[in-house]
Structure formats: C-alpha cells, structure tokens
Amino acid sequence: MRKGFLALATLIFAATTVFGQGFGTVSGIVYDSSGTPLEGAFVRLTEDGWHGGGGHGHHHHGENYFAETGDDGTFFIDDVAAGDYYAMASKMGYGHDAEDIEVTAGQNTYVEFYLEMGGHGGGMHGDTLEVVELSGWAIVETDSFTTHYYLDTENNGTADYRLLFGPPWYDPGSGATRPEDGDSIWIVAGIMGYSQPQPVVVYEINGLFWREPGGGHGGHGGNGGNCPHPDSLDLVDVTGLAMVVNMPHMDMYFLDEDYDQVEDYHLNFGAPWYDPGNGATRPEDGDTVNIVGGLMDGCMNWPTIIVYEINGQFWRQPGDTTWLWADPTSADGEPAPIPDNFITSRSYPNPFNPSATIAFELPETQHVRVAVFDILGREIVVLMDGIASAGENEIQFDSDEYNLPSSSIYFYRIDGETGSAYGKMLLLK
C-alpha cells in the first residue's frame, strides 16, 4: 500500500513538474488585406504583451519567439512559456498586424493576422505605432556616422531590437539618458518598420520619459517655411515603382505609388556617399520597392519621404540628419577632394531662402562657367561665364529674381579649365 502511495505520489509530482513548466503552443495563419494566405510572413511573440497606453512599472519582459509562415500562410510555435504576449506579423510590401494573446500551459492558442499597409494618412503614423514594453541588455555600437543602440532580450549577445532614440543632440529634459553597452534596461517603445532587428521608437527608458508617441521621432518641433523638421515627421509605409533620374553630379530618386509613370514622392536617401553599412542599397530605375520613412509634405514640388527603411532593410533612424541635405563635402565639413578635379565648392546657407552664396576655389586664374539647374536637370540661369581669379570666389544666387514657383532642390555646376564641381541647394519657402 505504501509502495503504491509512493508510486502515485511520484506520478503526481512528475505531472506537476511537467505542467509546472507552463508551456503551450501558438499557431495561426497570416493573410494579406484581401484574405489571401501569405507565405514568408514574419511572426514574433514578445512576452507580457502590452500596448496602447502610457506604460508604467517595471516588469520582466522580452521573452521572444519567432516563426515564418509556410506556403499556405500558416505558422506553428512550440514550447511557448505560459503568459501574456504581444503577437505581431509582418511582411515587407504587405504591412503588419498585431494583437495581445494569452498562452495557457498544455493548450494551443490560435491567432489570425490580416496585414495592412500604413501609407499617407494610414496606420503607420507616429502617433499610432503599436506600443510595446521590453527589457533586456543594451548593445551599443559606434561607427563613423553615429552610435547605434540595440536591445538583447535574451542576454545571449544577439540584438533583438534596434532602439531609436532620435538625433544625437536630443535630450528629453527628464534626466533620462541613453544606455551604455551592457546596461540592463527596460523601455516603452513603438514598433516601426520590418527590418531585423525590429526597430522601435523609444518613448520611455527605465521609468523616465523620453518622448511622447506622435510627438516627432526625436522630440523637435517644426522648422518653418511650411516644411517640418526631419525628426518630427509623419511615419509612412509605401510601395511602388522606383524612378531614377540620372544627373551628372548625383541621381534623384522618386516613387511611383500607383504605377502610372508619374512621380508621387521624392525619396531622400541622403548624400550620394551615405551608406548605412548593412548592405542596403539605393534602388535601380524600375525596381519595385517598399519604403518606410518620414513624410515631408508641402515643402517641395513632390511630397518628400526621408528614407528610414528600404525593402525591409534599415537605412537611417528617424531624426538622423547625417548628410541629409549635405553638399558634397567630407566628414569634417571641408570640400571633398574629387580625383582629377582641382575645383572645390560649397553653398551656404543650405537650406536657403531666398538667396544662397556659391563659393568655389580655383588653383589658378581661368575661364569658368557657373550654372544653376532644377531638379529635372533643366538649366535655370548662368550666373557666370568668364574669367575668375585663382583662390576663393563667391557668386550669389537669388531665387526671387527667377520667379521660382515653390520650395525644391536646385543644383549648381561649375565648369573650369582645371575641372568641374557640383553641389545641391535646398530652397525652403
């Protein structure tokens, strides 16, 4: 009898141990907006899912589970610890969907996702990002451009999220600071885009305020001239056909959203030499691309999107203006040397309204032609066509003299006997 009791107790203990582990499964299906199952969609479960509010308190969050849908749009995740989760599905070019789910030990939780694109006026705007609460260990990396911040939720040395704190100069004034490498932190943030690691815009760190959801992606206000500051833009998610205009000094990029061969957006990738360093590249003419970016509406001939992500690859963080409107100069602000070109140049102020100074330096006295072109490469005016002295020269370009219709990008070209130089000028009216 005692032996039987011990055996029963052992069986109960074993069963209790198994169920005490508290593991369940999660399965489901991902559809596009028309209800067609999607192959290759990315599914993420984040422990203790939370979204939609201000977020307070310190909890242990960040247990992550991942899956990819098969050719029938279905997915299955095994050995998921029981608890509440924020579940999100996304696929580049189709959008994303998310909801809170509860996983029960010994049971399967079924969930369906219907992916929707955000777009201009849509659900990807900065004040409607899906908000999550996460914790883990900071990974901080610095390159020649900027400092990158990541969150390792598993303490395994792998970045699970990219933390977007805004431009380097931004300070929320709350005493909150950016983390050091290896710091244990917890954050409230809004999910942005589809690249891996998943980018999130930080709203709160270690219980301290960082920025308001929808208050700009860096905490700065407008910039005047009917053109918002690059760190306070509406976040948009658009797909379309890339249109590339080849210029002698740099290429111009546009997006045809409805495939009618008409430019709907100007895409600002930054200066020609800007490279995010992760393998992402600018599109070729005719490529179908998905862009997540900041919309600058009403300040140019086209609505302009500052590119944050292209085809699911990170490009720049919101608020980062590194060489966004730059002249072709080097990192230290001096004119960049061009092989076999002994003319250097710059323009200032940039942006300008209504006039700009074009400065150029010549190695010797020579004949020089200085012309200004519009964004389509049409010559607007020849500012100089004659002899210029060796050394520094300056010439004025006054946009009011030529009845330029609106804010836009303009280019100057300097042709001399010892070479040529080019530059970009942004007119903000």
Image (cartoon, rainbow, N blue to C red):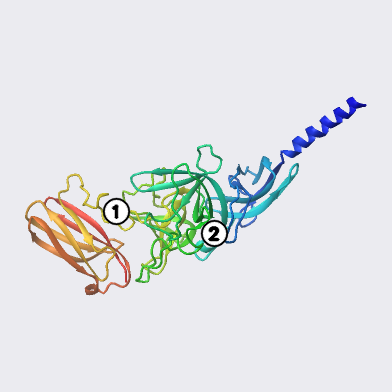
As drawn, is 143 to the left or to the right of 209?
A: left
Q: Local crowd at mark 2 within 10 Å, few (<14), some, or many (≥20)?
A: many
Label 1 Cα neighbours within 10 Å, binned few <14 / some 14-19 / many ≥20: some
Residues at marks 1 and 2, CA–CA distance in whole angstroms: 34 Å
Residue 294 image position (x, y, % from top left): 44, 60
Q: State the image coordinates of residue 6 (x, y, percent, origin top left).
A: 86, 28
Where is residue 102 shown, x and y percent of the image? 70, 50
Q: Is residue 219 above or below residue 91?
A: below
For label 2, the residue is 129
Tell me whether the residue at label 1 lies in contact with that at label 2, contact meaning CB atoms closer than 8 angstroms.
no
Query: Which numbered dot is residue 208?
Result: none
Type of amino acid at the residue the image marks with label 2: Leu
> Which residue corresponds to the image point at 17% horizontal and 60% vertical from the top-left?
359
Q: Is residue 99 visible?
A: yes
* Placement of 22 over or under 111, stated as above or below: above
SS under mark 1: loop
The foreground one among 419 and 68 is 68
Figure disc tally:
2
Between 294 and 91, which is closer to the camera in this rendering? 294
Asked where in the image residue 267 lies, by quadrant, the reply is: bottom left
Task: Answer left or right for 233 relative to 272.
Answer: right
**Labelled disc at residue 250:** 1
Select label 1 or label 2 by which is in front. 2
| N-terminal-most mark, 1 or 2 | 2
Q: Quadrant of residue 75?
A: top right
In which quadrant is the N terminus drawn? top right
At x 17% / y 61%, what residue is drawn? 370
The three-letter code of the residue at mark 1 reads Met
